[in-house]
Amino acid sequence: MDETDPKPNQALILCNVRELAFQIKKEFDRFTKYLKNVRTAVVFGGVPIQENEKIFKDPATAPHIVIGTPGRVLALVKKGILNLDNLDMFVLDECDKMLDETGKLSIKFS
């Protein structure tokens, strides 16, 4: 990811639970205080999806790094709110746990 000219939604980190997503967001906040042009956002269920939609619709607040849970990320992608065309990095945190839960959620990548 190029800090001098970052594009929205360049990195996506999927976490199996919102507590882990929030924890990762806090760690990114520590790093991005040195990278002034890089914005991060965390998205997960339990909060109104409209709050997440506002973040992505405004170019001034659109994050470069998105951290979230599969259900909320999938909902935002299906609604056309989260565009992954600029995606350079994709991380599955706790991948083994997410694979164990594949019966609960079906995600298809094209």
Image (cartoon, rainbow, N blue to C red):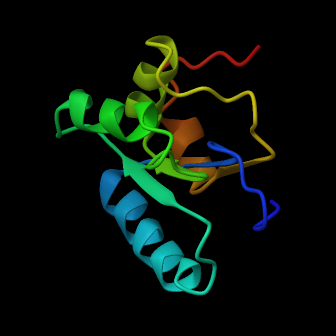
Residue 74 locus on image (x, y percent): 48, 24
Q: Residue at x 50, y 15 (%)?
A: 80
Q: For the C terminus, which image quadrant?
A: top right
Q: Which residue is at the front of the view, 59 or 30?
A: 59
Residue 100 to residue 61: above or below: above
Q: Residue at x 49, y 85 (%)?
A: 30
Give the mark count.
0
Residue 2 to residue 17: above or below: below
Would residue 15 be seen by someone viewing this image from the given angle?
no
Left or right, 79 with reference to 28 = left
Would residue 48 be seen by someone viewing this image from the given angle?
yes
Q: Which residue is at the front of the view, 1 or 89?
A: 1
Q: For the N terminus, which image quadrant?
A: bottom right
Residue 72 to residue 95: above or below: above
Residue 75 locus on image (x, y percent): 41, 20
Q: Residue at x 43, y 12 (%)?
A: 79
Residue 82 locus on image (x, y percent): 52, 28
Residue 98 locus on image (x, y percent): 53, 41
Q: Residue at x 40, y 75 (%)?
A: 26
Most distant residue in the front direction? 60
Left or right, 36 with reference to 69 = right
Residue 34 lies in quadrant:
bottom right
